[in-house]
Image: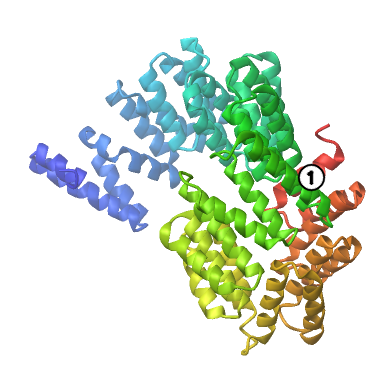
Amino acid sequence: MLKTPLLLIIIIFVASPLVAQNIAEIELANQYVDQGETDKALLLFDKLAKNSKNIPLIHDQYFQLMLINGKIENAEAYIDKTIKQFPADFMYKIDKGLIYTHKNNKAEEKKYYDKLIEQISSDAFKVRVTAQHFTKNQQYEYAIATYAASRKKMSHPGAYAIQMASLYRVLNMKEEMIDEYLIYANENPDNLSSIKNIMQSVLSEDADMQLFEDKMYAHVQRDPDNMVYNDLLIWVNVQRKNFYSAFIQARAIDKRLRQNGSDVMELGRIAMVNKDYKNAVKIFEYIIDSYPNTPNDQIARRLVIACREEIVKNSYPVDRKEIESLINDYRELVSKVGLNQYTIEALRSEALLYAFYLQEHDSAIVILQQIINTPRISKSIVDQSKLDLGDIYLLIGQPWESTLLYAQVEKSSKDTPIAYDAKLRNAKLSYYRGDFALAQNHLDILKMATTREIANDALALSLLIKDNTKLDTGDIALKRFAAIELLIFQNKKNEAMDELEKLKLEYTEHPLVDEVLFLEAKLNLEMGFFDEAIRQLGQVVDEHGADILGDDALYLMGIIYEEQLKDNKMAMEIFQRFLMSYPGSHMAADARKRYRTLRGDYL
């Protein structure tokens, strides 16, 4: 029955030859409309309208057709007659207002609809149907007025909040929309996650988020015990990557509700993922001070050191003594707490510092083997340690050991993020060795079936290979560039710099030029030659700004001025230029936040 056409159903239930004939004529009239033969359609509808039984079947099409074709007087006579024939059907009364709309008589239109809305405002069913009818006709303001009148009549300020929010959204009335979503959230706190998802999609501009944040602060000040407002204030600060403000709010809620630091811990992790290590440290230190001798305390102690590690590793040139201090901190943590599921990551971090910063590869291998052989630890830690071990074998020039370990992990954890990570490392290994076809085979799979971060890395490497092998049939330049990247991975920076200079001189017109300049700049940054790094990045922006590395280069210039040279004025200029030149870049949100922080917006 569900597949039976509506008109056929009518024929089945009303088995009259006359009705069947009318149905056929209605179908023909509708066909005329579809074919654009409106004069024929109107003539046929005029005939059909003489029989009141046909009105419910033809009304929408017939009435709209008269209005669209300028037959306003005919439409008015028809609707008045129809209202008399069907006095109980208020839908026809709603449609009569369209007469005033098409006459462009706004005063009469408003007068008519206001009276109608008042008449039906006590009937919830009629309110919803009327509002939906207005919405269908794109009369959104009247739909809002319908809900508002009923809300007032019911003395229920929260009624129809989600419907009104949706209408304000269509009208792009952001402030009113936010207000209605907040009303809905307060009455339906269990649906707060849904409201956050909606907000994330509709508040696309920074000014929208600022408006939302301002409203949240105002609401929290007026109603500090309302957890909905507090929760949303934390959320908007996280969206804007203002983690310290989010922390202040989360800390207050944690103390008030005695949450044992769980939500604050999650906030710290989010700050860490977003590379706001300084504020992440403050968050984790709060956990350590407030909840000693708890599982969260043990995790926070490790993560504090991990954040400090990231700060040290991104302060160029990296200070060897700071690395040794971090190793001691990890060692003390394991010694104090013992080796367990919370501290095993500390041991792994210690191994990586030995390998990549102190070049004490044997010490790193011993620690990773210890982790792999530790009983009753999670498989993910074992797999990750095997990947780390594979990286270290690549460091010391044993790529076959590396590829075997990567393959082990890929096989043992098939179709998981860590397996995709293993495949990406094998792809990079093939790339380093100049086997671009094999690397591309791995990358083609990864671009479609993995996490976003790994997919992005796979796509970037795939594009590098494709873009730089089209014109160079021997792949010589790219093979040399890949070999240089391996040197950098192996921490042979001076040797890599020499090879980059040779490559740049020999292939002045090759598509790799911007990649070479950008890699040189990153090396100079890591070696502490900041002015030279800025010069090379400037060259990328000026000569290759429209290419894929243009936004990366300009953004990195801003970072160097801000974090290494402590030149806030120049950093602000660079970030402002970045936002004007690359507004669609995935780094735009962070650049905007950095600019505003430097300007003092968050003081």
- Residue 272 found in image quarter: top right
Please determine whether, in this image, residue 498 is positioned above or below residue 292. Answer: below
- Residue 316 found in image quarter: bottom right
Q: Residue 444's spot in the image, x, y percent?
A: 49, 70
User: How many numbered dots are placed on residues in this image?
Assistant: 1
In this view, the residue in front, 181 or 254, is: 254
In this view, the residue in front, 96 or 263, is: 263
Residue 296 falls left or right of residue 90: right
Please determine whether, in this image, residue 54 is positioned above or below residue 320. Answer: above
* Residue 206 visible within the image: no
Q: Residue 43's spot in the image, x, y percent?
A: 30, 48
Name the residue located 85 percent from the left edge and 64 percent from the top edge: 533
In this view, the residue in front, 229 or 535, is: 535
Name the residue located 62 percent from the left edge and 25 percent from the top edge: 293
Secondary structure at badge 1 equals helix
Q: Residue furthest bottom?
A: 474
Residue 92 falls left or right of residue 148: left
Dot 1 corresponds to which residue? 594
Name the residue located 23 percent from the left edge and 37 percent from the top edge: 54
Q: Residue 100's spot in the image, x, y percent?
A: 50, 32
**Quadrant of the snapshot with the C terminus:** top right
Q: Residue 154's spot in the image, x, y percent?
A: 46, 11
Residue 152 falls left or right of residue 91: right
Please determine whether, in this image, residue 2 is positioned above or below residue 503. Answer: above
Graded by Cα atoms within 10 Å as few (under 14), some (14 to 19) or many (20 or more), the crowding at tag 1 reads many
The three-letter amino acid code for the residue at tag 1 is Arg
**Quadrant of the snapshot with the N terminus:** top left
